[in-house]
Image (spheres, helix red, strand yellow):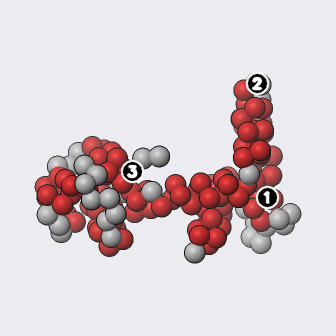
Amino acid sequence: MATFADRLQIARAAAGMTYGQIAEAAGVSKTHVWELAQGRVANPTIALTEKLAAALNVEPTWLSGWEDAAVDRAIDRMGWPEIHAFNYALRSGQDVREDAGGYMLRAIKALFGSKPADPVLTYRAAARAMVELARQDAA
């Protein structure tokens, strides 16, 4: 899993910005941004993360890795046997588009029971619902 420093470096490269430009946009020192990018400061505050994310035009949840942690918890709750079964089907020649609907429905049922509280119309909505449930469980 990528660290905050890794994500900061990726976002900086994608934005084509220098540490000085990021620092100015976020209202912090260039040295502090460099220390974050080198991993010398491991846990920036939420406020700083949000400022850096805004400067780099990325989501704070992505920059911080919070979203990955929520997805990992959702996967744990859904269950690795289901994920491995889907993976096995793909390696056996199953077309991902053919089984994606069934896979997502099984995942939703594993997370929410047999009837979700809100209708899930797209895979993106299903993924967001899984992440939101994982966040609620973490709180």
Mark 2: few, some, or many residues within 10 Å (few <14, many ≥20)?
Answer: few
Q: Residue at x 14, y 58 (%)?
A: 30
For numbered disc 1, what is the local secondary structure? Answer: helix
Q: Residue at x 17, y 49 (%)?
A: 18
> Can I make out residue 45 in this image?
yes
Q: What residue type is disc 3 on?
A: Thr
Q: Which residue is mark 1?
A: 110
Q: Nearer the viewer, mark 2 or mark 1?
A: 1
For numbered disc 2, what is the local secondary structure? Answer: loop
Tell me the distance, in whole angstroms, between the alpha carbons under discs 1 and 3: 30 Å
Q: What residue type is disc 2 on?
A: Gly
Nearer the N terminus, badge 2 or badge 1?
A: 2
Mark 3: few, some, or many residues within 10 Å (few <14, many ≥20)?
Answer: some
- Image coords of residue 118 (percent x, y): 74, 70
- Image coords of residue 7 (percent x, y): 36, 49
Q: Nearer the viewer, mark 1 or mark 3?
A: 3
- Image coords of residue 134 (percent x, y): 63, 65
Tell me if residue 85 comes above or below residue 37 in the rendering.
above
Q: Which residue is mark 3?
A: 3
Q: Give residue 29's quadrant in the image.
A: bottom left
Q: Which residue is mark 2?
A: 93
Q: What residue type is disc 1 on?
A: Ala
Tell me the distance, in whole angstroms, between the alpha carbons under discs 2 and 3: 34 Å
